[in-house]
Each structure stands twice: as structure tokens, then as C-alpha cells.
């Protein structure tokens, strides 16, 4: 895996934002509060870490403002840096130790570029293109404007540069009928592997604009019940690896599809079917206990929680990523993994 990595790109940086201000503020630590709490610097409302990196209001307000510090600069080395993508303040809570890293990728030449590694003559080369937004717009709903699409692509290119804008049907990837490669928006809709363009007649009418990619690494050394089986037999299209800084880790692929009513309605974030082959996983059906709609789709929002200004990048970082961690905890025997910590 590391042979395909290049420095200078960090994917999946997770930051916590408030839900109390019209313009959402980055939450900050406060000297008077413990490590499980953050404060909105504008409203001074306090937020509690539920135990998975998602912060919710706890009903209290601080009497003083937090001290907001600028993040320390990160040095760039010749090798991909393994950087923590959330604070390592786990305290006494039961959770996977997230001393893990974001993963590196080829640096894109523009903020809208996408990149895909391919093996050519025994070496890794990176195919790069700017997504064909005009063709992608054909699959967008009436309220999904070109400006919003550009914002979504720019946001993902910066934070998740290895993720690809693609297509799906019924929340499952729709692939090239010649080589089963992903279809991407490179001078129209084309296969990323063989560059073949599918005929319009071969595409389903309910084709959905989607994103596909791997989440940042999730440490699995704390999953005593399922670690050995994960290492011995990772699910298809999932990756188990090891790095000195983080130990054994799992890379989980997701498909996130825009709904026909986006941005008025939320996109659907889905696991691949193979993820449910992990020992201890619930059945791939609707489950209140595991926050699943069925067919691999995550239940990420309570009624009224979705807001039209939310982006796919925010969903992946702040909700889908936490869902994966909880579901792995569930498979490891923590049946109350989805219960809100109070």
C-alpha cells in the first residue's frame, strides 16, 4: 500500500463544530473543563464528546471564553506522515483507541482535480483529471446547482483527495460493463481503468451521483474479539495493514450517494455488503440497535437534524466515520455502542 503513497496530502481531518450558531464555529477546549468537553467560542455553550468524537450540547454555558490556539504547523517529510486525525483524549471511556493516521495520496494540481493510482509496467502512476461537472450535473436534482456541485467537489478534493466522484444505483456502485472499473467524470462519464464510455442505454434510469473512497485508518488493536479474524481474512475491498505509529488498522470503503432532493434531503452513506462479513456484525438489515436502514445504509440523522448547508465531506468526517467506529465496537461485543454517552 505504501508504494502508492506520496507526501503532502492529508485526508480526513476531523474537526468539531457547534450547532448553536447560524455560522457554525469550531469548538475549542476550555481550561475550566475536562478533556471530554469543548466550548463554542461565540455562544459559550458547552459540548460533550459522546465517546466517538461527535460533540453534542450538554445544556450548560461557560462563564468565560475559551483560549483558542492556532494549530501547530506540521512538518512535511520525504515519507507520508502518520498524523492523528482527532485528539487522543480517550480517558476511561470504552472505545477503540484512535491513535491512527490519515492516509496520504498524490498531490492534486488544482483544487478540483481527482487522482487515481494505476500500475503501469510495474510502477505506480497517477491518472489525474478535473471532473466534468457539466456531465455530472445531468444526474443532479433540480435544486442541486452547479455552484453547489463545485463546492462539494472542491471540499472533497481538499479533505479526501483519494475519493472519486462516480455513480451508483440503489446505493451500489455502477461499474464499467467491460472491465468492472469505476465510472468517473473525466471528459464525460468514463471508466477510470480502461477509459471506455458506457452507452446511455446501458445505464439505469435511476443513476445517482455518488462518492466512493476509503475512510482514514481505524486502529483495531483494541478489538480483542475480532482483531485476529480481521487480520487473517479482511472483507473483500477492505484493507488491513500495520504501521509502527498506529499498529494494525482497517481501511473501510464507503459509497455516499446524493439523494434526488439534495440539498433538501440528506445523501445516503452506505457500507459495501462485504463489511457485514466481519465476525460479530449485525445482519445487513434495518436495525435500531445498530442505526442501520438496511442494505448497508447508515442512519446518521435524527428527525430534523439534516440541514441543507451540510456537505458530503461533513457527513463522512463527522458522522459516517463515527458510525464505522461504533459498528466495529458493536462487532467486538459492545452491544450498546450506539447509545449516546451522557
Image (tube, grey):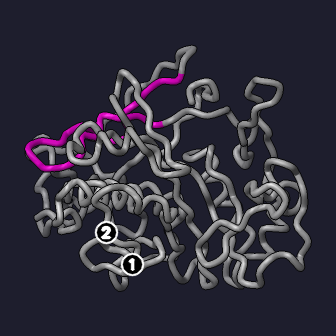
Which residue lies under the disc numbered 2? 282
Does the stretch in magenta take in 262? no
Q: Residue furthest top?
A: 78
Q: Residue at x 70, y 45 (%)?
A: 111
- Contact between marks 2 and 1 (CB within 8 A): the answer is yes
Q: Residues within 10 Å of mark 1 (few under 14, many from 20)?
A: few
Gap in angstroms between the C-alphas marked 2 and 1: 8 Å
Q: Quadrant of residue 58?
A: bottom left
Q: Residues within 10 Å of mark 2 (few under 14, many from 20)?
A: some
Rendered location of residue 110, percent (x, y): 74, 41
Q: Residue at x 55, y 46 (%)?
A: 159
Residue 328 vertical position relative to residue 84 in the rendered view, above or below: below
Which residue lies under the disc numbered 1? 285
Rendered location of residue 295, percent (x, y): 48, 76
Out of 314 and 239, give the one closest to the viewer. Answer: 239
The residue range painted magenta reads 80-102
Residue 182 vertical position relative to residue 219 in the rendered view, above or below: below
Q: Residue at x 14, y 50 (%)?
A: 94
Q: Quadrant of the C terminus?
A: bottom left
In this image, 57 relative to 195: left or right?
A: left
Q: Quadrant of residue 87?
A: top left
Rendered location of residue 144, percent (x, y): 68, 77
Judged from the image, the secondary structure of the residue bearing numbered disc 2 is loop
Rendered location of residue 283, percent (x, y): 35, 72
In this image, 86 relative to 132: left or right?
A: left
In the rendered image, is residue 41 in sight? no
Amino acid at each position: 500500500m505504501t508504494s502508492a503513497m506520496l507526501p503532502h496530502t492529508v485526508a480526513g481531518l476531523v474537526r468539531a463544530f457547534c450547532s448553536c450558531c447560524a455560522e457554525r464555529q469550531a469548538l475549542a477546549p476550555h481550561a475550566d473543563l475536562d478533556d471530554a468537553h469543548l466550548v463554542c467560542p461565540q455562544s459559550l455553550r458547552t459540548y460533550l464528546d459522546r465517546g466517538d468524537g461527535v460533540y453534542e450540547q450538554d445544556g450548560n454555558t461557560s462563564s468565560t471564553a475559551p483560549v483558542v490556539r492556532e494549530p501547530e504547523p506540521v512538518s512535511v517529510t520525504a515519507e507520508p506522515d502518520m498524523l492523528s486525525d482527532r485528539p487522543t483524549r480517550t480517558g476511561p471511556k470504552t472505545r477503540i483507541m484512535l491513535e491512527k493516521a490519515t492516509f496520504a495520496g498524490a498531490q492534486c494540481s488544482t483544487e478540483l482535480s481527482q487522482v487515481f493510482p494505476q500500475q503501469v509496467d510495474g510502477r505506480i502512476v497517477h491518472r489525474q483529471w478535473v471532473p466534468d461537472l457539466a456531465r455530472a450535473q445531468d444526474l443532479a436534482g433540480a435544486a442541486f446547482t452547479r455552484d453547489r456541485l463545485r463546492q462539494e467537489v472542491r471540499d472533497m478534493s481538499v479533505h479526501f483527495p483519494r475519493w472519486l466522484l462516480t455513480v451508483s444505483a440503489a446505493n451500489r456502485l455502477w461499474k464499467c460493463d467491460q472491465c468492472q472499473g469505476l465510472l468517473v467524470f473525466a471528459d464525460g462519464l468514463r471508466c477510470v481503468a480502461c477509459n471506455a464510455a458506457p452507452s446511455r442505454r446501458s445505464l439505469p434510469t435511476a443513476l445517482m451521483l455518488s462518492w466512493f473512497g476509503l475512510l482514514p485508518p481505524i486502529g483495531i488493536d483494541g478489538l480483542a474479539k475480532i482483531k485476529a479474524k480481521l487480520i487473517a481474512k479482511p472483507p473483500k475491498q477492505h484493507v488491513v495493514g500495520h504501521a509502527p505509529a498506529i499498529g494494525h488498522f482497517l481501511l473501510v470503503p464507503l459509497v455516499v450517494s446524493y439523494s434526488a432532493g439534495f440539498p433538501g434531503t440528506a445523501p445516503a452513506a452506505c457500507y459495501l455488503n462485504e463489511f457485514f462479513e466481519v465476525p460479530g456484525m449485525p445482519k445487513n438489515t434495518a436495525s435500531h440497535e445498530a442505526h442501520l436502514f438496511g442494505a448497508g445504509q447508515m442512519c446518521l440523522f435524527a428527525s430534523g437534524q439534516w440541514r441543507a448547508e451540510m456537505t458530503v465531506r461533513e457527513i463522512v468526517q463527522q458522522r459516517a466515520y463515527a458510525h464505522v467506529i461504533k459498528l466495529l465496537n458493536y462487532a467486538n461485543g459492545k452491544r450498546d455502542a450506539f447509545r449516546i454517552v451522557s
